[in-house]
């Protein structure tokens, strides 16, 4: 289109003509006024022709008028356009004159012609300019169109890429869908097969179901009867719960009382320490005052002496004065005599004046002596007055000191009375604390059973502890219950193809406290520390650890003393005992402790502290028969047993170490069977308070019992069997003794067990017995755990519903001895 425009001169449409006309300046339009105006002719070729005709006409002088008319027609608004023919005719135009020499006419024609040529050129110039502008516009349009085209191309390209990825994805999807389809089809085939097999299994199960329904009916009947039993048990349980809550309330009240007493005790102790401090300061002051008094006394004595001296001096001075007075009187008499004599002489004999002068001198000297003696007397009298004043002052000070001394004495007496009162109150409070402590322990139960589960060890079976042991979380058994899950019958799974365990049999136990595998040695000790205190208060305390081999008895009792957090109950108890006994010294208590350690293996007692043993089960001790005897006071004596006085934890620790050595030596010699012996550590505590005249005798027995094992596990040798039987017998006899003492039965069976006979005095009466039942979480030793828990439950049952016991050894028992 543009090229066409460029090649061909524009055929001006009317509007274009108007536009062009608009662009031509007004003055120029006037100049071209004589030309034919396009606007007036109506446009098209005709108008162009008309215009050319007009131009031609104008060149014709004959057409002047017309031309003028035309000019007038056109007005100032017309535009002249030239066609090719116009231009050619304009160029071919020839000048015509009237004649050859009509130069003027020719000149006018030429001017006119030049004007028209100029007009034509101008028109062409303008046209060219317009073309250039148009060309520019068209170029811009073309460029923008090109840009649009490029953008469009880019967009198209992107779209194509997107579509290609979409197509790729769709292709992949279709492949995976095809694969899934194939898989689903194969699964469908498998499902159809399994459906068929299930159908068969279902028939089998239906048959089983029928037989189980019969069983179920029977079980329901059993259930009903069990329900009746449960109801009755529930009623008993409710009663015991109520009893328990009342006991707990009573216990909490007692604990509160105990707390207040403790606080009072603390307050009194503080007061006591303040009073003691006061007393010490007062004693100091008293001593100072005493010193002062004695110094005052000394000064008084001195003053008295001085007074006496002064008095005697005064007396002598008085005497001297008297003598001097006498002398003076005598001399005065003499003077008078002499004067009389002189007068006599003067009168009668007229003695010489020299003699008279002498006598006068003599008399003057005597007068001087007299006056000096008078002065002396005056000074002495002054001294006497000062000494008397001093004496009075000393008397006053002595009086003051004495009054102060007396008031201080009264204060000291008062303080001593208060101190005695405070001490009395402390002693009373201590008695009360002991009583309350004992009451609390009695309420908790004089026989208690704690269960402790040890953590899994690398040597244990692969299963987790949680799979066989769990701890009920109900309110009444929280922290006290333990459930043992035992795998029971086998069944068939849903498919009917695989055998699975259908039933887990649950064995539930409740003890006074259950320590999970996470419980630390400290957690365990916190629970028994009160019992240790009881031993110090003069009670008999027995703490056992019972359980299968490897269940953690030794860890519980002895632990690993070299690691502070893993110390067991024995070292911790001893620490507490020594610390407490030290702190009670300030209350006037003096303690004496005696330790002994023995081992009972196969009903044979071995002294673990004997120095005779040459590091082994030697002949000197092996043949020795230790005899157990009970005295009237319920104390036990083992003849020839080494009893060592101990004063510090260090001493006991070294004894424990010695005992462990003796045990471990035995271990090698007895075929690694030291765990098959009972280890008994006994600490006798004798306490005396001289100020309150109190005495206590406590016994602390800490026992690591032999590891229990099932007979089936006990090996084939006769010795092993005998040994296991001995352990089982002694353990069951122990539980019998505890049970019968708890029930206050007359007959106490100790069934030829040295262990029970040895411990019997410590198990009855006010004695405190605590048994740890240690169990292993290893599923492979479930049977042993169950046995241990049942044994412990039997001991635990002693305390249930049994009122506080007051059993003590009968006198007849004292004659008993067990060798
Ligand atoms: N609570 C516990 N935490 C960590 N380890 C424990 C715990 N209880 C026991 N063990 C570990 O288990 C192992 C067996 O424990 P231990 O020797 O105390 O058992 P035992 O009942 O005394 O055995 P035995 O009857 O044979 O003497 C030891 O290695 C001990 O360290």
Image: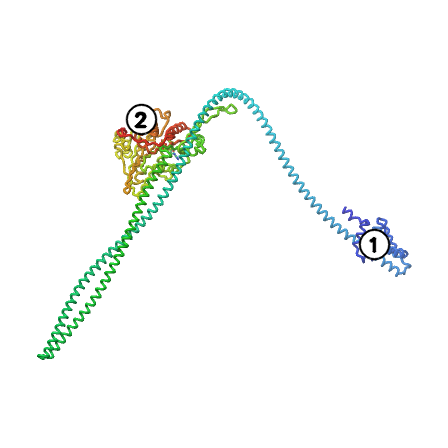
Q: Secondary structure at mark 2?
A: loop
- Residue located 31% across and 45% down the image: 421
340 horizontally vs 171: left or right: left
Res 123 quadrant in image: bottom right
- Residue located 61% across and 31% down the image: 175
* Residue mark closest to the camera, 2 vs 1: 2
Ligand 1 under 8 Å from disc 1 Cβ: no
Quick one: 690 or 120, which is closer to the camera?
A: 690
Instruction: Determine which of the numbered discs, if any, sits on residue 78 in the image.
Output: 1
Q: Secondary structure at mark 1?
A: loop
Q: Quadrant of the C terminus?
A: top left
Q: Residue 750: x percent and y percent? A: 31, 27
Q: Residue 484: x percent and y percent? A: 43, 29
Quick one: 136 or 223, which is closer to the camera?
A: 223
Residue 104 in view in this figure: yes
Q: Residue 429: x percent and y percent? A: 34, 41
Distance of mark 2 from mark 1, alpha carbons? Answer: 154 Å
Quick one: 758 or 229, which is closer to the camera?
A: 229
Res 68 quadrant in image: bottom right
In the depicted structure, whether residue 477 falls above or below residue 11: above
Instruction: Determine which of the numbered discs, if any, sits on residue 751 in the image.
Output: 2
Instruction: Compare marks 2 and 1 and give the one earlier in the sequence.
Output: 1
């Amino acid at each position: 289109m543009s090229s066409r425009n460029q090649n061909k001169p524009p055929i001006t449409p009317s509007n274009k003509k108007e536009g062009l006309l608009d662009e031509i300046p007004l003055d120029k339009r006037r100049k071209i006024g004589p030309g034919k105006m396009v606007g007036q002719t109506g446009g098209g070729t005709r108008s162009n022709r008309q215009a050319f005709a007009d131009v031609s006409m104008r060149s014709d002088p004959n057409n002047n008028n017309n031309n003028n008319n035309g000019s007038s027609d056109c007005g100032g608004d017309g535009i002249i356009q030239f066609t090719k023919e116009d231009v050619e005719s304009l160029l071919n135009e020839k000048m015509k004159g009237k004649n050859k020499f009509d130069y003027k006419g020719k000149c006018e024609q030429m001017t006119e012609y030049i004007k028209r040529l100029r007009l034509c050129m101008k028109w062409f110039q303008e046209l060219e300019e317009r073309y250039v502008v148009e060309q520019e516009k068209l170029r811009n349009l073309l460029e923008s169109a090109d840009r649009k085209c490029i953008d469009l191309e880019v967009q198209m390209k992107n779209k194509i890429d997107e579509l290609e990825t979409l197509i790729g994805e769709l292709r992949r999807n279709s492949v995976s869908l095809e694969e899934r389809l194939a898989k689903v089809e194969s699964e469908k085939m498998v499902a159809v097969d399994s459906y068929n097999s299930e159908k068969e299994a279902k028939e089998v199960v239906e048959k089983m179901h029928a037989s189980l329904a019969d069983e179920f009916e029977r079980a329901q009947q059993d259930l009903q009867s069990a329900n009746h039993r449960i109801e009755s048990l529930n009623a008993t349980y409710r009663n015991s719960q109520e009893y328990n809550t009342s006991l707990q309330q009573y216990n909490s009240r007692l604990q509160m009382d105990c707390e207040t007493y403790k606080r009072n005790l603390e307050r009194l102790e503080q007061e006591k320490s303040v009073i003691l401090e006061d007393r010490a300061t007062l004693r100091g002051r008293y001593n100072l005052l005493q010193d002062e008094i004695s110094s005052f006394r000394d000064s008084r004595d001195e003053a008295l002496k001085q007074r006496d001296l002064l008095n005697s001096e005064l007396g002598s001075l008085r005497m001297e004065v008297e003598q001097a007075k006498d002398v003076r009187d005598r001399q005065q008499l003499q003077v008078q005599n002499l004067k009389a004599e002189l007068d006599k002489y003067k009168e009668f004999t007229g003695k010489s004046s020299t003699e008279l002068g002498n006598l006068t001198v003599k008399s003057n000297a005597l007068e001087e002596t007299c006056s000096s003696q008078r002065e002396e007397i005056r000074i002495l009298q002054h001294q006497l007055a000062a000494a008397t004043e001093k004496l009075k002052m000393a008397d006053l000070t002595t009086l003051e000191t004495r009054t102060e001394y007396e008031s201080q004495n009264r204060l000291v007496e008062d303080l001593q009375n208060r101190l005695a009162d405070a001490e009395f109150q402390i002693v009373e409070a201590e008695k009360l604390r002991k009583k309350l402590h004992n009451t609390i322990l009695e309420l908790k139960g004089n026989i208690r059973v704690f269960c402790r589960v040890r953590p899994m060890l690398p040597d244990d079976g692969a299963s987790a502890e949680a799979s066989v042991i769990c701890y009920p979380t109900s309110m009444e058994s929280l922290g006290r219950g333990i459930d043992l899950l035992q795998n029971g019958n086998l069944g068939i799974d849903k498919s009917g193809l695989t055998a699975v365990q259908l039933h887990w049999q649950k064995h539930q136990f409740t003890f006074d406290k259950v320590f999970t595998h996470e419980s630390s040695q400290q957690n365990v000790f916190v629970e028994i520390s009160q019992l240790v205190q009881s031993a110090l208060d003069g009670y008999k305390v027995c703490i056992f650890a019972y359980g299968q081999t490897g269940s953690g008895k030794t860890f519980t009792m002895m632990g690993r003393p070299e690691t502070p957090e893993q110390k067991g109950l024995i070292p911790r108890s001893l620490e507490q005992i020594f610390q407490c006994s030290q702190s009670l010294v300030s209350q006037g208590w003096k303690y004496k402790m005696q330790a002994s350690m023995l081992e009972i293996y196969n009903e044979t007692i071995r002294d673990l502290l004997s120095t005779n043993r040459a590091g082994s089960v030697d002949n000197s001790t092996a043949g020795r028969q230790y005899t157990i005897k009970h005295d009237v006071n319920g104390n036990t004596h083992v003849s020839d047993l080494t009893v060592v006085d101990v004063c510090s934890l260090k001493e006991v620790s070294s004894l424990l170490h010695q005992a462990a050595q003796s045990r471990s030596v035995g271990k090698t010699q007895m075929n690694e069977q030291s765990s098959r012996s009972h280890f008994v550590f006994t600490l006798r505590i004798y306490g005396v308070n001289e100020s309150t005249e109190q005495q206590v005798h406590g016994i602390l027995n800490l026992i690591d019992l032999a590891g229990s094992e099932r007979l089936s596990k006990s090996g084939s040798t006769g010795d092993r069997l005998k040994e296991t039987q001995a352990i089982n017998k002694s353990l069951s006899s122990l539980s019998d003794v505890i049970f019968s003492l708890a029930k206050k039965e007359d007959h106490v069976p100790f069934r030829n067990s040295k262990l029970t006979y040895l411990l019997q005095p410590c198990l009855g009466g006010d004695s405190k017995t605590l048994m740890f039942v240690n169990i292993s979480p290893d599923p492979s030793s479930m049977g042993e755990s169950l046995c241990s828990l049942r044994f412990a439950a039997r001991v635990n049952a002693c305390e249930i519903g049994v009122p506080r016991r007051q059993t003590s050894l009968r006198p007849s028992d004292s004659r008993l001895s067990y060798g």
